[in-house]
Amino acid sequence: MVVFFYRIILVLFLLMLSRIGFYLFNHMMFPDITFSQFLHALRGGIVFDLAAVVYFNMLIILLEAVPFDFRYNAVYEKIVSYLFFLVNGIMLCMNGADYVYYRFLTKRATADVFGTFANEQNNGQLFFRFLVGYWPATLTTLSLLVLMVWLYARVKPVKPKTENRLVYHSANFLFLPLVLLLAVGAARGGYRHSTRPITISNAARYVNNPRYVPIVLNTPFSILRTYGKKNLVKYNFFDDAKLKSIYDPHYSYKPDKPFQPVNIVIFILESFSKEYTGFFNHDLEAGSYRGYTSFLDSLLSESLSFDVSLANGNKSIDAMPSILASMPSLETPYIISHYANDEINGLPALLKKRGYYSAFFHGAPNGSMGFDSFSKMAGFDDYFGKNEYPGNSDFDGVWGIWDEPFLQFFASKLDGFHQPFMTALFTLSSHHPFKVPEKYEGKFRKGPIPICQTICYSDFALREFFRVASAKPWFDNTLFVFTADHTNEKFHKEFQNAYGQFSIPIFFYRHNSDLKGLKHRIAQQIDIMPTVLSYLNYDGDFIAFGNNLLDESKETFGFNTFGSNYYLFMDDHILEVTDNKTMGLFNYKTDRFQLDNLLGKEPRLQEKMEEKLKAVIQTYNERLIDNRLVVK
């Protein structure tokens, strides 16, 4: 057992030395990092090294942990040692290659590196030129390999002498499940059920500047976690001039009015499908449908909203980049894609340049869904989760703090923030198993599906938040933005289609303002950032894949994917494309059930929409592949 843990610690030690080597070779790429920040990045790196060690050494771990005496056999030990040197030597070489390769990518290498060199005819020649041309990196890596072999041989397994065979063999058999349990936790990055297996975007949790993320990561982990993820393809549907004329995400705001430092509060409502609201669905059930959001319906009557409003994805991890950085997820969620460590301009980071303080709130245990990591990537100053919530009495027993008390906690924290501030809160109670606090059992109306009563509860929690917030001195100077992360179960036929799959509420509310009315426009999550910046009279350049909803001169549209299907919403129609082949064209306004396929019947509209979608895909893919998501 001692030898087993020694060898695990040995690999972790070598990976840490390799990380320090990575920094020393590329220190010019991190000019502003302080020593304490560097140490914090090293500490975070242990989490990713542990995961990499478990993934790459799984066979070795099993061979070392088998509860039988033949593991002390000389031949068996020799086989294990050779496997150890091979597997962990490959890991060190991967890191060593990134000593140099990072300078060209400005991010840790991912699995698409294999595709980059797959078609080269002279890979062998290139490989040896690399070894010689970058000899300092080669020498450093070789030194680590030699050190690995030398340290490995310092401690050898010796069969213990035992007096009680029963105790000895019992301990051996108990050791195996213990090792497997520890391995699972290390590979996942934690043991909580709400913790997703860590991915490369989680590295942002350990740095205060997203540019330092590569120091936290290791290359074996980055390659492994992106292996099997679909690579983006660089398309050339249009030349640069034509492409920009159709779709250009480079915004350059030059307002003729001064910047107005209004507070921004964004509510991301868990699973709030548009179907659950009454305001947008007066025609459902022959006009008798009331919905389950009585408070939001009242707020919508005083807000700026849109008759078509869409999510840009189907999962919570799709929503975060879309809402907070105008970064959609096309086919693969951005956060777990090869490109998750591209530099982005999040809304809080842009507003920080104008003196804003920012904070993100989510009532789940910190680390849940990787939200705390992405919040750092987007530029938030602070994160408040279950860990920061006082006490544990309001824990729902599954996901986190009930919405009502957590929203009150949110309101109290806003009181202490200096203005202007930008905050975002992600609710959680409208989530499976769709329970409400025991004291409210029977209070909220139930519907045909279980989520309905929890939608009512979360709507009530928002009502209580606004009851308190409306009396605060910062309230009138605050723009509230409401949206949802994604849809949930649909129970009306009108929503059981591609349109309903993405329909969520999106609206803007500010007390005593002219932001009012239901506009005949298409809104999507990625429109929130450019719209908010426009409202503030932000002056500057940034990249946003969405539309400015306040610019009436520009046509609005929406797009998203579901599996390998692409959807484009424009001119009251939805275009469905699979593998670059148009499969359907429907008028979602007049054909609510999407039964009449207009493919080939509206050639001009179809051509226009196909052209727009191709431009979106070409632009998105190019910018992610080339790491051009910020204006420099």
Image (cartoon, grey):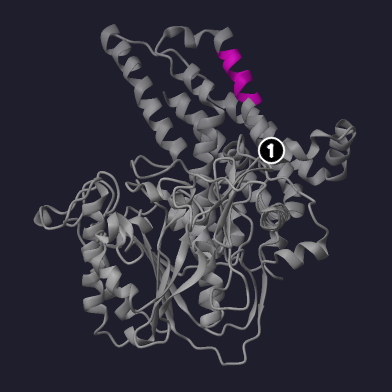
- Where residue 45 appears, as percent x and y from the top left, is 53, 48
Q: Quadrant of residue 184?
A: top left
Q: Check if residue 79 falls in the magenta segment.
A: yes
The foreground one among 418 and 518 is 518
Residue range corresponding to the magenta coloring = 77-86
Asked whether, in this view, residue 337 is left or right of residue 26, the answer is left
Asked whether, in this view, residue 330 is left or right of residue 143, the answer is left
- Rendered view: 68 above or below 268: above
Secondary structure at badge 1 equals helix
Residue 205 visible in the snapshot? no
- Give the quadrant of the C terminus: bottom right
Which residue reaches farthest bottom? 257
- Where residue 509 appears, as percent x and y from the top left, is 38, 77
Q: Quadrant of residue 547?
A: bottom right
- Give the quadrant of the N terminus: top left
Q: How many marks?
A: 1
Residue 411 visible in the snapshot? yes
- Rendered view: 214 above or below 240: above
Q: In the image, what residue occupies the spot 42% across and 53% down?
A: 486
Q: In the image, what residue occupies the spot 29% across and 63% down?
A: 278
- Where residue 528 appears, as percent x and y from the top left, is 50, 69
- For the residue marked with disc 1, what is the amino acid? Met
Badge 1 is on which residue?
Answer: 94
The foreground one among 480 and 601 is 601
* Magenta highlight: main SS: helix
- Where residue 475 appears, as percent x and y from the top left, is 32, 84
